[in-house]
Image (cartoon, rainbow, N blue to C red):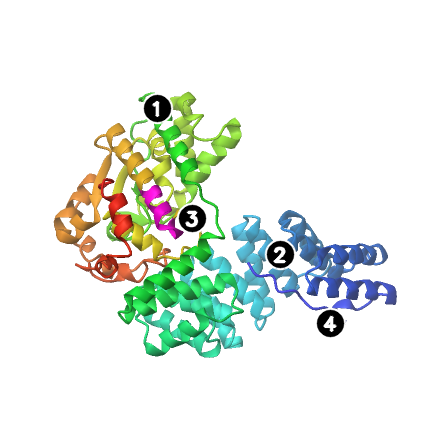
């Protein structure tokens, strides 16, 4: 979240001695320049002279906040509020640290109070909007960002955040208008350019291409901005049917991104070997064979139809789409820390009671997704590695193994600038290595758990949608509902911005771009020729 440093006007320093006031000013100047150490020294001197200085305690909380020590920051803000109740800036800072500390309900209460106490304080509304957005209260987040823009129409971060939230809610037209408004004021704003490209459904025009080409070659452009502009330019060139130049820009942008990341194909291969060894033999009989029947795991590579599959299932009145939730990896990681052994080394020693305990923990953590509907989907991108553990924990769960043409999938990932993760996707050879390991492990799961993992082909879904949707619903134990055929009309929040606009449209029969890049992708096609489907 954003912690705008509060100034220290005279009325907030009233009653201080000249020496104390000097220390307060030193602290404020140090914080304004991002220097927490001298600020802390000055504040300790201030509080030695004036222990009841609410401003001093508040700024000491800001120092802890800057360092990431949110527990200490909360203590400082609480002490400041004890001395100066309902102070709006302090409430805002308190809300930020409470949110970062995981106290979401308290954070939202503090941020709401800050906005009530100071209705014209733009940073308070902005931070409230960010907290609401992350906490999946997207309509309320939109209203908070709109309030920011009423106070400051040129608040670029709020307008970009509003547009991102509108995308997740399916209001694509409003989102595009807001991204364009950002670019009207800041033509070089790489976040807005990338967000427009990431919609996939909004074409760029000649003026856009010219602007993006000029920006991409700007000599002093920061690396992150050049990467984002490069991915947007590649799409703009594609929109103009300039495929060879588009691929060259894409190659350059991917190479820039790859230099920022670490990924090791050999390490991933060893991890897959270890997982297959750990789950090679049947585990103990489950304590409760029906535990987890609420859960539908979706397993797939990025850009291979997982969001579409979830949108179809979430169109059913009994299913909530939870998107890429992180609860399963977190449960596994916490168990690894408890045992002091990395996953999957501890898996063969886990008892039926251990797996049931972990399954109940997962269900408790995901209870929020069953408040309105009894079933939910989990399509975290790491599910493919954790599937053996997931089915041991939740023997009643269903698993949908989605896949798409190998070259199509790899190239779609290569064309995508991911917000987090997917470090394998910025080099086509590494992307192919990851695809091969993914296929190898998913085939193992299908053999290891016959009847519990549905093979779900994107191409088959496009070719015969009704038959494949009926098959999908039947596997998940769901009665057929016509709404699943009209999935694009379903109103729900879609967190995957790369697919949010696409799943609002009916199925497209031919979305392949491979024909335009035959020469550039020939080596990838040759390598993946023997990989076959998952």
Q: Bin the neighbour count of mark 2 within 10 Å (Cα to Cα): few under 14, some 14-19, many 20 and up.
A: many
Identify the element where label 2 is drawn. helix
Circle 1/circle 2 CB separation < 8 Å: no
Judging by the rendered image, the residue that carries numbered circle 3 is 423
Q: Nearer the viewer, residue 489 or 108?
A: 489
Whether residues under marks 4 and 2 lie with C-beta atoms below 8 angstroms apart, the answer is no
Residue 303 picture location, percent across and down = 31, 52
Give the spatial CA distance, label 4 vs label 2.
20 Å
Viewer-nearest residue: 93 or 416: 416
Element at badge 4? loop
Residue that appears at 34% across and 45% down: 379
Magenta part of the protein: which range? 425-435
Q: CA distance from mark 2 to mark 3?
A: 35 Å
Residue 126: give x, y in percent of width and height: 53, 66
Please name whichever residue, 386 or 130, is drawn nearer the observer in this view of the structure.
Answer: 386
Q: Please tell me which residue is depicted at 29% across the width and 49% down the height of the picture.
A: 524
Earlier in the chain: of badge 1 and badge 3, it is: 1
Residue labelled with disc 2: 94
The residue carrying mark 4 is: 9
């Amino acid at each position: 979240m954003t912690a705008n440093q509060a100034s220290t006007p005279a009325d907030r320093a009233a009653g201080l001695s000249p020496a104390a006031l000097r220390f307060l000013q030193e602290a404020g100047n140090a914080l304004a320049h991002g220097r927490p150490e001298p600020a802390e020294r000055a504040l300790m001197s201030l509080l030695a002279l004036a222990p009841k200085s609410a401003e001093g305690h508040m700024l000491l909380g800001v120092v802890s906040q800057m360092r990431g020590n949110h527990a200490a920051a909360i203590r400082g803000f609480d002490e400041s509020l004890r001395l100066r109740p309902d102070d709006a800036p302090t409430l805002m800072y308190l809300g930020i640290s409470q949110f970062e500390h995981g106290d979401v309900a308290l954070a939202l209460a503090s941020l709401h109070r800050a906005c009530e106490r100071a209705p014209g304080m733009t940073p308070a509304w902005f931070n409230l909007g960010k907290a609401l957005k992350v906490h999946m209260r997207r309509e309320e987040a939109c209203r908070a960002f709109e309030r920011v823009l009423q106070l400051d129409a040129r608040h670029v971060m709020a307008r970009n955040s509003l547009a991102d939230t509108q995308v997740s809610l399916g209001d694509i037209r409003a989102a595009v208008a807001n991204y364009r408004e950002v670019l009207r004021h800041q033509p070089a704003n790489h976040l807005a350019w990338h967000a427009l490209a990431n919609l996939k459904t909004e074409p760029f025009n000649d003026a856009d291409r010219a602007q993006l080409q000029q920006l991409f070659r700007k000599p002093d452009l920061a690396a992150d901005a050049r990467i984002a502009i490069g991915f947007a330019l590649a799409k703009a060139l594609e929109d103009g049917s300039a495929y060879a130049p588009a691929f060259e820009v894409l190659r350059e942008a991917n190479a820039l991104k790859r230099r920022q990341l670490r990924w090791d194909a050999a390490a991933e291969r060893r991890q897959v070997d270890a997982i297959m060894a750990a789950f090679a033999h049947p585990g103990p009989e489950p304590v409760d064979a029906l535990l987890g029947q609420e859960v539908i795991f979706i397993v797939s590579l990025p850009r291979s139809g997982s969001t579409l599959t979830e949108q179809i299932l979430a169109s059913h009145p009994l299913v909530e789409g939870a998107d890429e939730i992180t609860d399963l990896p977190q449960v596994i990681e916490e168990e690894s820390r408890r045992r002091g052994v990395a996953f999957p080394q501890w898996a063969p020693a886990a008892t039926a009671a251990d797996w049931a305990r972990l399954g109940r923990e997962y269900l408790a953590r995901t209870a929020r997704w069953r408040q309105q509907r009894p079933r939910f989907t989990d399509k975290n991108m790491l599910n493919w590695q954790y599937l053996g553990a997931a089915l041991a924990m939740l023997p009643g769960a269903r698993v949908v193994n989605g896949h798409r043409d190998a070259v199509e999938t790899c190239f779609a990932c290569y064309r995508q600038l991911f917000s987090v993760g997917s470090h394998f996707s910025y080099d086509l050879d590494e992307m192919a290595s990851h695809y091969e390991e993914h296929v190898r492990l998913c085939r193992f799961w299908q053999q290891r758990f016959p009847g519990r993992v549905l093979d779900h082909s994107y191409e088959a879904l496009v070719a015969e949608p009704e038959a494949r949707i009926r098959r999908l619903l039947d596997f998940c134990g769901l009665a057929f509902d016509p709404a699943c055929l009209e999935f694009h009309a379903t109103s729900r929040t879609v967190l995957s911005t790369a697919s949010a606009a696409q799943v609002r449209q009916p199925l497209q029969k031919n979305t392949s771009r491979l024909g335009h890049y035959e020469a550039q992708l020939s080596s990838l096609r040759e390598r993946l020729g023997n990989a076959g489907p998952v």
